[in-house]
Amino acid sequence: MNKGKNIIILILNIAFYALCDIKYLPLVGFEIIFTYLVYCKLKNSEKHSKMWLTIGVGAEICFLGYFKYVGFFVQDSDGALKILMPLGISFYTFKIVSFLIDSYKKKLTCEISLLNYAIYVSFFPQILCGPISRADDMILQLNGDCRITEEKLIKGLQLILSGAFKKFVIADRLAGYTTTIFSNPSGYPALANWIAAFFFSIQIYCDFAGYSELAIGVGNLFGFSCPANFNLPYFSSSIKEFWTRWHISLSSWLKDYIYIPLGGNRKGRLRKNVNLLITFLVSGIWHGSGLNFICWGLWHGMLNIFSWKKSNKKPLLFIQYIATFVSVTFGWILFNASSLSDGMKYIANMFVGFQFGLDVIVSSIMPFTGDYSCLAYFITVCIYIVVLFGFELKDYRREDTNDLRIKYARSAFYLLAVILFAIVGQSSFLYANF
């Protein structure tokens, strides 16, 4: 890829971020230039490399901590101090930190210019919600002949259609219902609380996986190759397997820069368990400053410690799939709640006074639209969910994965569904808030 094309991409990055959050564009620019200068010091100063690494990583953590967590720790008479957070700061901070650490460890194998580094940090499809790409991979493509091929164009368009279907057809249609129930769980039957909890699990997956597919697809249109960020996570038989399939770029980042440096599994079972808890605690803190996020991280840490082995017996394996999904769903309740106490109240409402009958079912479905047209709406959304997971079940079983006719038929279905049923422009991506 030539220098002129790289300059055009950087201009697009700047324009995109300016449209999204122009007031913090100078901050992003400053962080890019500052950390690139730190990289130059790391590369040219062996004697003081550890000092420069500490300065660079420390500064990035301070930026992230100030904008993301100061409202949690500092309060005044009117409540928590609110500071507007730069969009994408969690994602581009992790990209910068991994870049600096890899530079210090001499893991970067390619020459890195300021232009290509700026593109890597601010690449517009990824800056809001990831994936968290690695410098050596992306900058190597920028330095090389990153051509736009017919194969990349087709794959990119297929990913864009799939991502749009997940986000605008399923996630955004479920959002109205889950928001209604989560905002007032005691005002609805316990059955509605259960439905909303399971629907939020699907919503957050379709929202985030949809964004990742859109980002990777747009990257393909520019000639970039990026590995998948999700790999059928709800077909996991254990929490351990779930975290190899969910938000893969974050999972691998936490493993490489938190878990392994802490000692990984090299220092005995007790130390391994402590390292797992610390790693997932960091994951919780990265997602948000509330106690609910900390408990969400610790919940997954504990589930990983007691994670079971995949069974060879189909009946037991099916139970493992269900148990894993339910365990993840209870974690998402804490994740989606506005506070830890609200999350615990929500869980309590799922069990207190649980009833099942025609009146309860009607009351539980009504929040979809507020009138009796909600039944058709509810059924339509459920059909789309069943179709999506039917497609994913075939992918999980590796059925028809190389049949181009099947892929084109899916893309045509996604396009038609987006045209007929999408909600566009009324909501943001969930992970843009983190």
Image (spheres, rainbow, N blue to C red):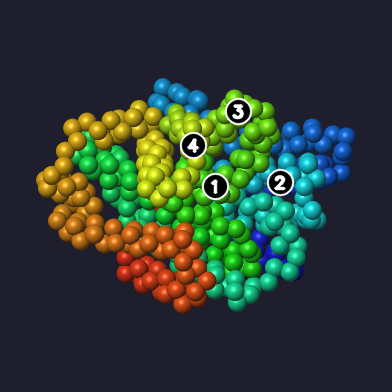
Residue underneath mark 2: 99
Tell me, yes or no, if residue 286 can be seen here. yes
The residue carrying pointer 1 sits among few (fewer than 14), some (14 to 19) or many (20 or more) residues within 10 Å by Cα, namely: some
Q: Secondary structure at mark 3?
A: helix
Residue beneath the point at 71% across and 46% down: 99
Snapshot quadrant of residue 382? bottom left
* Count of numbered circles on the image: 4
Relative to 251, say whether 118 is above or below. below
Q: Earlier in the sequence, mark 3 or mark 4?
A: 3
Measure how far apart labels 1 and 3 are at the Cα level.
Answer: 20 Å
- For the residue marked with disc 1, what is the amino acid? Thr
Measure how far apart labels 2 and 4 are at the Cα level.
Answer: 32 Å
Residue underneath mark 1: 244
> At which x and y percent is residue 244?
54, 47
Left or right: where 4 falls relative to 73: right
Left or right: where 385 falls relative to 188: right
Q: Nearer the viewer, residue 145 or 86?
A: 145
Measure how far apart labels 1 and 4 are at the Cα level.
Answer: 13 Å
- For the residue marked with disc 4, what is the amino acid? Ser
Q: Earlier in the sequence, mark 1 or mark 3?
A: 1
- For the residue marked with disc 3, what is the amino acid? Arg
Measure how far apart labels 3 and 4 are at the Cα level.
Answer: 14 Å
